[in-house]
Image (spheres, rainbow, N blue to C red):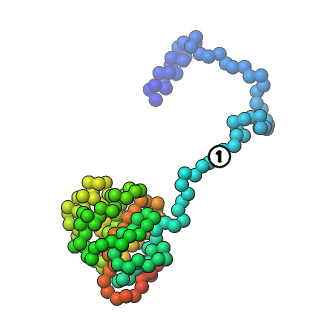
Amino acid sequence: MAAGFALRCLYRARPALRCAPVELPWAPRRGHRLSPADDELYQRTHISLLQHESPHAMYIDSYNSRGFTVNGNRVFGPCALFPHSVLQWNVGSHQDITEESFSLFWMLEPRIEIVVVGTGDRTERLQSHVLRAMRERGIAVEVQDTPNACATFNFLCHEGRVTGAALIPPPGGTSLISLGQATE
């Protein structure tokens, strides 16, 4: 603001620095219609999409004590979900989660922003050195019970975040629980 004021004062003080007004051969009138000769306004614009929005984003449909249904496909046992793939995860319980079992999340591309961990029917604490290792690699970890972890993963994917999930099926009956039913 001060610079604008100084320039305005300089402009008023030195008339020799001012540019002479430009004389136009014709002045546009209010009723002037643009024509293709008014080139800048009629140039065509081309848009190139670098990446189309993926219609096959990961979505957890349901879960039970045996596994998960992801995009209509059954996955048995613990699984690791990535933005465009699902892998079996070789853990039995939250006590088996180590730095090595999380190594997939920092080795694969695209780089994962946040990993949602589902520890079964209850939220369990993970070992502090495992959480520290993930934080050092720039990956946030959210530990929840599996039903809430599934819902959180779906929400983050819907937002377009680069999200991973490490899910352990909750123990109990074999009834199929749809996420639509779980939220009601």
**Residue 160 location in percent, x, y?**
46, 60
- Horizontal side of 101 relative to 180 (left or right) equals left
**Residue 35 location in percent, x, y?**
78, 37
Could one spot residue 137 in this view of the protein?
A: yes
**Residue 151 location in percent, x, y?**
40, 72
Between residues 42 and 23, which one lies in front from this camera angle? 42
Answer with the quarter of the image where residue 40 lies: top right
Split into 4 quadrants, where in the image is the C terminus?
bottom left
Q: Would you call the spot at circle 1 few (<14 residues within 10 Å), some (14-19), or many (20 or more)? A: few
**Residue 107 location in percent, x, y?**
34, 58
Give above or below for 153 relative to 72. above
For mark 1, what is the residue?
46
Q: Residue at x 33, y 62 (%)?
A: 104
Q: Residue at x 40, y 62 (%)?
A: 163
Mark 1: secondary structure: loop
Q: Residue at x 62, y 48 (%)?
A: 47
Give above or below for 72 relative to 111. below
- Horizontal side of 6 relative to 52 (left or right) equals left
